[in-house]
Image (cartoon, rainbow, N blue to C red):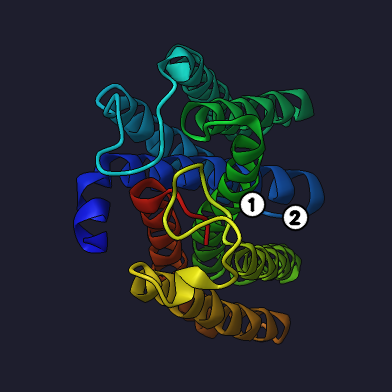
Amino acid sequence: MAAQAIAQNLALINWTVLTGLAIGCLAVVAVADLGTEATRGFLAFTAASAVAFGLLAWLSDGSLPSSVVDSPVVVDPSWDLPRRWALAAFIALSAAEVVVVWRRRRSRALVVAALVAAVAILVTSALTWGGPRPTAIVLFVQQTLLAAATGGVFGAMVLGHWYLVTPKLPEGPLVLVSRLLLGLLVGLTVLSVVFAATGIGVPGSDPGGAEPFAILVGPWALFAWLRLLVGLAFPLVVSWMALQTAKSRSMESATGLLYINVGSVAAGTILAAGVFFGAGLFI
């Protein structure tokens, strides 16, 4: 059963969510630090959140299963150690960013290095669970967008909350982050429609291959529709509303909408990861 397959792979789903939160938070720091007037407190807190989520991901990484139960996904253990080293480097660099920001300094090289470590995490994880190289590339693209959206919406929510204690903060930072979040969700929606239309998945996945939209009527239909409606369509509408309210400086409303979006985007990430690890399918 589909639900049982997801339950059996909760450790991998949890890892996906935690790494997404960590990487996305750091991406928000990079955007806000280099392109807006975001406050030192917000930058330090969000970078510290990236460290905390990264540590949780690193701790969970050591207990990940060596095989994926009842799934066509095949684990390549040769990438386990590089993945863990990339996670450790990301955590260390993000922690250094917290210190730098708190001392009222800025280092673009440090932020770039941390983002390079984040890319290394995504590459090695795609090679661990992606199987043949074409599938690994697709998994890397999906994981990158999922991480940016999952951590990005968390960072946007934190930024919105910052306006409640810093009323004079210009609306520019929240408008920019909200606009980028909306763009990410549009990209994920287009990608999911392409996935459904092509039936792409790892070799041996069912349904897969040449059957267009088979995932929407097969045994994984419930989770696929939940992913499309709850994890993408609903957050798209809420993100657009949050952007409009941020533009009009209705920061309390924008923050409330972003709180809602944290849950819906995270639910979408859980569903996407569950369908992949449970059935070897992309949605």
Numbered disc total: 2
Q: Is residue 268 left or right of residue 186?
A: left
- Identified by mark 1, the residue type is Thr
Q: Quadrant of residue 107?
A: top right
Decide: few, some or many residues near mark 1? Use Cα within 10 Å; few <14, some 14-19, many ≥20.
Answer: some
Percent across and percent down for residue 122 are 57, 33
For the view shown, which residue lies furthest in the front direction? 210
The Cα atoms of the two marked residues, 1 and 2, are separated by 6 Å
Q: Residue at x 68, y 54 (%)?
A: 38
Q: Residue at x 59, y 78 (%)?
A: 236
Q: Secondary structure at mark 2?
A: loop
Residue 120, can we see it?
A: yes
Q: Could you tell me the amino acid type at mark 2? A: Glu
Q: Nearer the viewer, residue 146 or 39?
A: 146
Q: Position of residue 271 (x, y in %)?
A: 39, 62
Residue 266 versus residue 103 in the image, above or below: below
Quadrant of residue 181 within the rendered picture: bottom right
**Residue that badge 2 annotates:** 37
The foreground one among 84 and 221 is 221
Where residue 253 appears, x then y in whole percent?
52, 85
- Label for residue 39? 1
> Looking at the picture, how far across and down is residue 227, in whole percent?
45, 70
